[in-house]
Image (cartoon, helix red, strand yellow):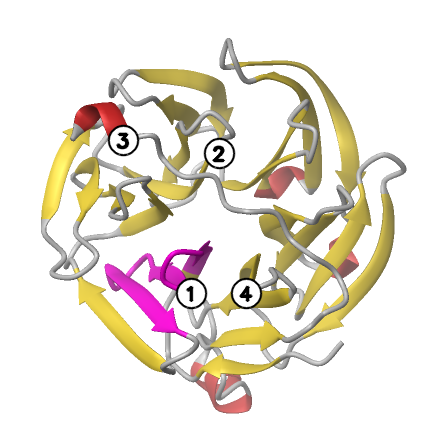
C-alpha cells in the first residue's frame, strides 16, 4: 500500500478525520491551532474554519452541521461560517484538561474523551452526550483518551488509552448506552509506536495510527494478530478513517507536534493529510449525531 499526499498542509496536531458522505468531503481538525479542515475531493478544494480555540474532535450531525468538543465545551458548529453554539461541558471546572478524540455511536450519541493538557496520568475520562444533551461518564481515570470503534454487528466497542499500549474490547449495549466486560483485544509492541486514532473496516478488523511509529496497522481483534502495516514518511501518525465514494480510500492524519527543528527538516510532510486510494478494504459509514429533536 502506498500512502500519497491528499492535502499538503502543516497541521500542528492533525486529528479526528471523518468522512462526510453528503458532501463527499474529508473533514479533520488541528487540535492545537483550533481549526476544522474540510477537503472536497471532487472539487479538490480545502475550506478551513478557524475557531481560535482547541478542538479535540468533530462529528457530523444528521442536520449537516458539526458537533465539536472545544475548550469552551461541546457544541454545534456551522460548517460554512464556523458559528458556535455551546450545549454542554462535563469538565467545566477542570481548566487543565482538554478534549481529545471522539466519535458518534450507532445510536447517534457523541462519545468524547478528555485528558490533561500536560498529559498527567489518569486525569481524563470518556463521556457520552445524547440528543437531549445529557452527559454520562463511561470510563474514568484515562490518560490519553484516543481511538474508538464499534464492531460491524454493533455488539462490541473498542477503545484506546494510548499509554496502556492496548486496545480494550467491551460488550456494547446500544439501547442502554452501556459498556461492560472489558478484555484486551490487541497489545501493541513498543517497536510499533504508540496507538493513537483508530477505525474499523467492514470485515471487523481494526486500523490503528501510531504516534512516533511512522505507520498505520491493521489488526484482528479476535486473535490480537497484526495483519499488515502502511508505512508513512512522517513519525507522528495520529488517526485514520475510510472515505471516498465506496469507502475504499484510507485517509490518514499526521502531526508536527513534538518534533525538533531537525526532525521537521527531515520530515517536510509532517502535518499533512495522506490517503491510500483503493486500499483493497472497505470502511463503514460514519455514525452521525442525532440532533433531529434539538433543532
Q: Position of residue 56 (x, y in %)?
A: 34, 47
Queried whether the magenta region covers residue 161, the answer comes back as no
Q: Give whichever of 191, 69 is nearer the camera.
A: 69
Q: Residue at x 20, y 41 (%)?
A: 76
Residue annotated with mark 4: 245
Q: Residue at x 34, y 48 (%)?
A: 58
Q: Which contiguous range is marked in magenta?
A: 15-40
- Crowd tier of the residue under label 3, counting other residues whose Cα lies within 10 Å: few below 14, some 14–19, many 20 or above: many
Calculate the distance from the C-alpha at mark 1 to the C-alpha at mark 2. 39 Å
Q: Give whichever of 205, 217 is nearer the camera.
A: 205
Look at discs 3 and 2 and give the one toward the viewer: 3
Q: Position of residue 243 (x, y in %)?
A: 54, 62
Q: Residue at x 23, y 23 (%)?
A: 293
Q: Is residue 239 left or right of residue 65?
A: right
Q: Position of residue 148 (x, y in %)?
A: 56, 39
Residue annotated with mark 3: 291
Q: Earlier in the sequence, mark 2 or mark 4?
A: 2
Q: Main secondary structure of the magenta part?
A: strand
Q: Is residue 164 left or right of residue 111?
A: right
Residue annotated with mark 2: 121
Asked whether residue 49 appears in the rendered view, the answer is yes
Q: Earlier in the sequence, mark 1 or mark 2?
A: 1
Q: Are marks 3 and 2 in contact (CB under 8 Å)?
A: no
* Labels in figure, total: 4
Amino acid at each position: 500500500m502506498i500512502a500519497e499526499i491528499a492535502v499538503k498542509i502543516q497541521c500542528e496536531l492533525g486529528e479526528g478525520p471523518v468522512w462526510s458522505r453528503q458532501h463527499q468531503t474529508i473533514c479533520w481538525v488541528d487540535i492545537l491551532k483550533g481549526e476544522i479542515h474540510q477537503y472536497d475531493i471532487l472539487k479538490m478544494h480545502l475550506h478551513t474554519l478557524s475557531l481560535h480555540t482547541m478542538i479535540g474532535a468533530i462529528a457530523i450531525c444528521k442536520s449537516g452541521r458539526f458537533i465539536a468538543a472545544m475548550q469552551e465545551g461541546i457544541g454545534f458548529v456551522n460548517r460554512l461560517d464556523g458559528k458556535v453554539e455551546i450545549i454542554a461541558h462535563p469538565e467545566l471546572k477542570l481548566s487543565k484538561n482538554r478534549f481529545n478524540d471522539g466519535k458518534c455511536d450507532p445510536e447517534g450519541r457523541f462519545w468524547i474523551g478528555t485528558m490533561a493538557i500536560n498529559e498527567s496520568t489518569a486525569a481524563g475520562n470518556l463521556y457520552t452526550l445524547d440528543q437531549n444533551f445529557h452527559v454520562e461518564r463511561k470510563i474514568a481515570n484515562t490518560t490519553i483518551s484516543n481511538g474508538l470503534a464499534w464492531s460491524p454487528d454493533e455488539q462490541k466497542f473498542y477503545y484506546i488509552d494510548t499509554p496502556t499500549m492496548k486496545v480494550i474490547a467491551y460488550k456494547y449495549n446500544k439501547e442502554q448506552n452501556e459498556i461492560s466486560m472489558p478484555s484486551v483485544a490487541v497489545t501493541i509492541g513498543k517497536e510499533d509506536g504508540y496507538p493513537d486514532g483508530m477505525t474499523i473496516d467492514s470485515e471487523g478488523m481494526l486500523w490503528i495510527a501510531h504516534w512516533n511509529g511512522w505507520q498505520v496497522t491493521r489488526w484482528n481483534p479476535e486473535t490480537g494478530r497484526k495483519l499488515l502495516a502502511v508505512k508513512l514518511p512522517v513519525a507522528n501518525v495520529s488517526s485514520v478513517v475510510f472515505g471516498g465514494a465506496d469507502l475504499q480510500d484510507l485517509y490518514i492524519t499526521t502531526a508536527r507536534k513534538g518534533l525538533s527543528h531537525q526532525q521537521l527538516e527531515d520530515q517536510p510532510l509532517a502535518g499533512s493529510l495522506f490517503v491510500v486510494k483503493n486500499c483493497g478494504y472497505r470502511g463503514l459509514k460514519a455514525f452521525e449525531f442525532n440532533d433531529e429533536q434539538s433543532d
